[in-house]
Image (tube, rainbow, N blue to C red):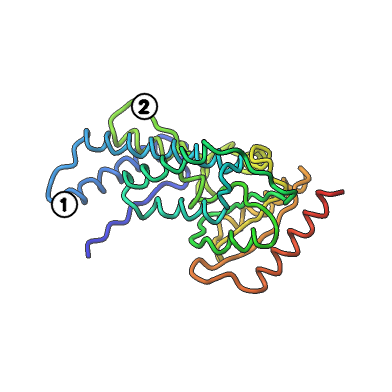
Amino acid sequence: MPVLTVSTPVWVENEHALEFYRQELARARRFLEVQIGTEISDGSIDDSMKLHDEHRSMMRRLYGLRRERRGGLSGAQMLSVVLASFLMPREEHLRAVTELVAELESGQPEAAAGLPKVLVVGAACRSEDYLAVIEDAGCIVVDDELCTGSRAFAIEAVPDGDPLDRLARMYLTRVPCASKHRPGFDTSVRLVDKVRESRADAVVFLFTKFCDPWAFDYPYLRDALDTAGIPSLLVEIEQHVPPAEQIKTRFSAFVEMIGAAAKR
């Protein structure tokens, strides 16, 4: 099976990174043209970018409704919608999400029944079971800051330039994850702002085991949350393994703690 590895720069904010990534995208384009046996025109890339931008916009609306608790969409259900977007044809997923958004917008916000609200943070989470376990412990996953979550839809379109240049700028100017470096960008400030925006009471870090970039970032992220008076819990997970009983126990104890603190 033909395989192509596309590399992305680690230091994202300089012209060398932009030129390198643009060349990588051009190489990917040539590779795909050979595989499908036809040219990939600028126009077709433009059309695809418009489709994906419309899809990201609709997913951001869905996240907004989720924060408002319209329609009772749970955190696990929200992650199911997100994970489906990585597998389904984009047109089909956009149609389904558009219908879901219309249905949720017609409803009224649901009361949180006094349950603490949690923001989930990390890189990848490929199983809804982890979010279900968090909510089964007695809280609400009101939002997330996951690469397989809201971060995938926080990318803003770049309006001017040829398609590959726009693609490169679009992905290099997005909010960097832990594996990328942008001078002067403070992840902790964004995290605290995200907690305030989602009106969460606490943060749960879901880190894939042996993910060094997030492990390096964690201490100062935790300290920033402590300074802001926001409780947090770190849990290391394995992507293809169901939540262990000890993880369930830790979630239950944490939710009990933040629930008691909220009542004081």
User: What residue appears at the point 77 percent right and 60 percent down from the top-left corner?
Assistant: 256
Q: Residue 161, relative to residue 37: is it above or below?
A: above
Q: Where is residue 227 in the image (x, y as percent from the top left)?
A: 78, 44
Front in this rendered view, residue 19 or 171: 171
Would you identify the image quadrant in which residue 157 lies? top left
User: What residue appears at the point 39 percent right and 48 percent down from the top-left corner?
Assistant: 8
Amino acid under label 2? Pro
Q: Mark 1 points at which residue?
A: 36
Tell me the number on the disc at residue 159. Answer: 2
Would you identify the image quadrant in which residue 191 lies? top right
Tell me the number on the disc at residue 7. Answer: none
Amino acid under label 1? Ile
Which secondary structure lies at badge 1? helix
- The N terminus lies in quadrant: bottom left
Which of disc 2 and disc 1 is earlier in sequence?
A: 1
User: Residue most toward the left?
Assistant: 37
User: Residue most toward the bottom?
Assistant: 245
